[in-house]
Image: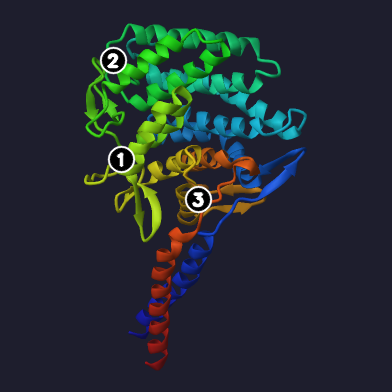
Amino acid sequence: MRTLKRILSLIIGLWVPIIILFNLRLYYQPSYIEIGSSSINSDVVHQLNFLKEKMHIGAADDMQKLFPEGFVFLNSLYALSWIELAQHTNENQDLFKEAIDEINWVLMELESPKAKRPFYGSKGLPYGIFYNGWYNYVLARKCQLMSHLHIDSTHWIKLQENCKNIIEALNKSESPFLESYPEKCWPADMTVAMASVAIGNRLLNGPYQKNIDQWIIKVESKTDSIGLIPHSSYPVNGNVKDPSRGSSQSLILNFLQEIDSSYARNKFNIYKKNFVDYRLGMPGIREYPKGKNGNGDIDSGPVLFGIGGAASIVGQRVMTLYAEDDIALGLRNCIESFAIGITIDEKKRYLFGLLPMADAFIAWSNSSEISERNLTTGNWKWNYKAHLVSIALLLLCGIYFYRFRKL
């Protein structure tokens, strides 16, 4: 009996510092360092240091074994985080040059046969819209980044070809959402592709604006019952197969803003009403809209008390982009607490670095605050309920230890 009590005391004793640390992390703010004339988020730099080490020893190959799109997804998110950093760094700085090297390395990885291999057989567009969308979006952002310097001619030609191929395939399709895999269609993938076309359209002085406007009209005709772009659609006609979910909707809203900001704002308002929720005062993004429940899967990641892991991580970036600072700050700091962000030797990892895909998503979301000018400065009132619950738990721990000493 005494042994059991000692074990229980040890467990409760370990929870005390965890609870205290959790509450302190709710007040996290990123650190910034001066690099040339820029003030850069050092935590994101440290995240990219960690990811760089992992990426160059095959992290994307490892993620492909766990996720159907792991290789392309991880490479793309990694490159996009470097692009955000490079945008706010002077081109004469070593960090800018490192960013360009890593972006170019990713583009070579995405052009490799192993990147394309999972997507053979898709109709309408070789390798499907997931592969083409993410590859072309990274390519478009790279060209956009370099537009005031020197765009690599090979990349520039590829961007023009890819945009042309995407639009031609779309014009031949009854559905506004092309296949990601043979007979499978996720509209979020099409949104990424159209964001790449929208960037290309601006760089090319507008040849695809009519196509983009027509696409928006067709998309609106295929929305679900609450007016949002669905999670999955039937490939033939684009009709709703699975209605909107937090994981895909958070992703869609990151890219829809680049295509049509007014249309994106309208969809964001619906998303905020139906998917933003609170647990113990802490904000989160639901995987299923209010009034509906469901289980987690490969798309959503873990779903706890209705709050989706992927939806909330990507939702942090959405809230920053749409200037919802209070929610963005709450999501950022809850992720920092629950995902246990740790920096060792200027390398920052989450969840002990066991899942680089999570690190890549968090780095991409955090990169929305890459410059100190973009620092989220919401209020902190959202966390008082978490503090009250924590105080109650600490009191219970104290009562237990007081009673234990008397036994």
Q: Which of pointers 2 and 3 lies earlier in the amino acid sequence?
A: 2
Q: Which residue is more in the foreground, 75 or 231? A: 231
Residue 14 vs residue 175: left or right? right
Q: Is residue 298 visible?
A: no
Q: Amino acid at mark 3?
A: Leu
Say which residue label 2 marks. Answer: 175
Residue under the point 51% across and 28% down: 76
Residue under the point 51% across and 49% down: 350
Q: Which residue is more in the foreground, 35 or 342? A: 35
Q: Secondary structure at mark 1?
A: loop
Q: Is residue 375 above or below residue 118?
A: below
Q: CA distance from mark 1 to mark 2?
A: 26 Å
Residue 329 disc label: 3
Q: Is residue 390 above or below residue 181?
A: below
Looking at this rendering, what residue extends furthest in the bottom direction? 406
Q: How is the image coloured?
A: rainbow
Q: Is residue 155 above or below residue 321?
A: above
